[in-house]
Amino acid sequence: MPRNPLVVVSNRLPFRVVRGDDGRTKRIRSPGGLVSALTPVLTTRGGVWVGWPGTAHEAGKRGAAARTHRHQGFRIAEVALSAHDIASYYSGFSNRTVWPLLHYFVGRMEVDPAWWPVYDSVNRRFAEKAAEAAPRRALVWVHDYQLLRVPHHLRACAPHLASALFLHVPFPAAEVFRILPWSRDILHGMLSADYLGFHVESYVQNFLASAQLLLGCDVDPARGVVRYDGRDVHVGAHPISIDVAEAEALAGGVSSAWRTTTDAPIEIIAVDRLDYTKGIVRRLAAVEQVLERQPATARRLRFTQVLVPSRERVPDYSQLKREIDEAVGRVNGRLSMDGWSPIRYLARPVPREDLFAMYRQANVALVTPLRDGMNLVAKEYVASQLDDDGVLILSEMAGAAEELQEALVVNPFNRDAVAGAIQRAVTMPAQERRARMSALRARVRAHDVHAWVTEFIDAATLAVKQARSRVSPALDDVISRVGPWLAQRPQIALLLDYDGTVTPIVDRPDAARLSESARLALDAASRTPGIDVAIVSGRGLDDLRQRVGLSHVTYVGNHGFEIEGPAVRFRHEAADHVSTAMNAAADALRELRIKGALVEPKGPTLAFHYRGVPERDREAAVHRARAVLRRKRLRAVQGKLVIEGRPLVDWHKGHAVLWLLGHRYGTDWPTRVRALFVGDDTTDEDVFRSLRGIGRSICVAPFVPSQNAPSDYRLPDPQSVIALVRWLSAGGFRPAPP
């Protein structure tokens, strides 16, 4: 396969920056197999690592430029984050909302609406940095739960770039994932990648179920394919591993022969980062039970708990640390005697060479998280057992349990089961110990982290090639999904916005002319039995009718304040009371003399267009225009590079569409007619929301909009909308006769 450049995007860079005693900063390589595996790949292929430096003094102000520099043969592109970004995006949404949800700790999930826009904004900046730094034919590999929206923003700003995403934590069942208020946004973000990777097959199936349930995607579980936005997105299981050669080298300098002597203590080890997902307090209770109920072996046991500090400033974590401290103290206080204490407690980071020496010497490893994406401690322990003589006790809630089936697999919530596994492990015959461990070591050695990287990149590259060679128009996707729904009723109400929907957006609104082919398609649809066509626009009614020029069509103008068509005429009562205010506001807006701005009076409403205003001046122009509308006691509504002035009443396109449908078909219209609305602007979102659940809507956008625009489907441009209209007028939605 072609060895295209690689762009790695992760929350943190492959090193951390520390300040020495002399005040100078230096880089220290981050621990872990991922960094050691990806570094040579980036060096060989060429590429970039995009991430946050992680130090407060380098975070800078929000939006500040960050450095791009060389590091070990490849480039580093830093994303600068402000203190506010770090608090909301990282500490908040990532670690207090997404992390507990993905690990099934719903009761610990915090939902703060202020965190979500910061998370999305930071993800956009990561995507923009990756797009800026990436060679044209690069594969962008995004990592983990902090960056689940990056593929969406990357496709928006650099659609030519291939992308893959790997999630290093579990993906929960669909009924759990949907609890997150932004679950559909997250799915949109993830499915914008060309390839998605998870640790194990159960996470893959959970994700596929979520895509089907929450987005209505067509899913092929057997092939691991999601049909999304006209593309095939491939999803696969890739269990991450460790650097086995490094582990064996670190363990090789320590002898474990002494532990088989008659009077040697039986060493049990557990190594965890401080986190509530690890189940440490429950594990200590199981150890205590063994010590109490098995007095014959209790005095020979020594349990070592290594606890690496993490997020100790977070109240929940500091409380957890106190609970662990108290549990260790209670057990040692109750059961210690004659200088012997059953628990050795190391609440500090342990150098890797010391850690692997402890692995090598331990008879048993107790790896019992309540939920874990993979858990590499299990694989590190296995790799360290050079004599094939240890026993691994492993939680069935860890992804590693799907691979390491020769371990003693337990439910970590069942204290009796964990205690029983400990007793079995310490009394296991040597022949069984070696049979189990030799099988475990063979599997871990055959699939180390270097193989994992190669296999994932190869799978992603193949998926990109397959997906991009089989892309079908988004229209086909919409037709396949909306067609069966339309066929359930004899009548269709086809409601279409004008600007940006049936005709392209142009710099000046008076230049937005309907093409003759579009007019013919609309005319054909309006004359087709069973199709009722309405044009719903912010344009004035007379202007709209003149531009479309069809007599069989209903016109909804001025955002619904005026409606006119076959057997219907409506004018909102507020429209007759605002003409003076509208004229005065139009004059005041013109007096602002903002270069490039255009004021468009439309009777009951007016529009302040600022598409022609230089980008650097737009924020100030909008602020001044809104101030004018407030002074004239008008409602200011944001559109696509336009501010709409409307009467101070609760009325918009969504209300007008519902009024029209009820007037024409009765209050029970959903039982008689299928209402399908197509629009592109933020003002069309009112219709999207009004029809949610009783109709269907299509957003016209070059890429998938966020969930804040709650449409059901997407079409990329007005040409595809007109193609949909032709399909409808040809009767494509009607079921074939029996």
Image (cartoon, grey):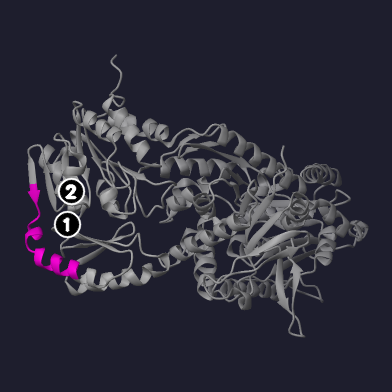
Badge number at residue 602 = 1
Badge number at residue 45 = none
Residue located beneath label 2 in the image: 543
The relative height of residue 265 versus residue 163 in the rendered view (above or below) is below
Q: Residues within 10 Å of mark 2 (few under 14, many from 20)?
A: few
Task: Compare marks 2 and 1 and give the one earlier in the sequence.
Answer: 2
**Residue 634 seen by the camera:** no
Q: Does the magenta stretch include residue 280?
A: no
Could you tell whether 596 is left or right of 126 in the image?
A: left
Q: Which quadrant holds residue 720?
A: top left
Question: Which region is colored magenta?
Answer: 570-587
The relative height of residue 147 versus residue 139 in the rendered view (above or below) is below
Q: Of helix, strand and loop, which mostly describes the magenta segment?
A: helix
Q: Does the magenta stretch include residue 581?
A: yes
Asked if the residue at tag 1 contacts the one at tag 2, i.e. Cβ–Cβ closer than 8 Å, the answer is: yes
**Residue 493 seen by the camera:** yes
Pick whichever, 710 or 513, lies toward us: 513
Classify the position of the C terminus by image quarter.
Answer: top left
Q: What element carries label 2?
A: helix
- Residue 103: horizontal and vertical position, in percent? 55, 56
Q: Is mark 1 on a helix, strand or loop?
A: loop
The amino acid type found where label 2 is placed reads Asp
- Residue 296: horizontal and vertical position, in percent? 79, 60
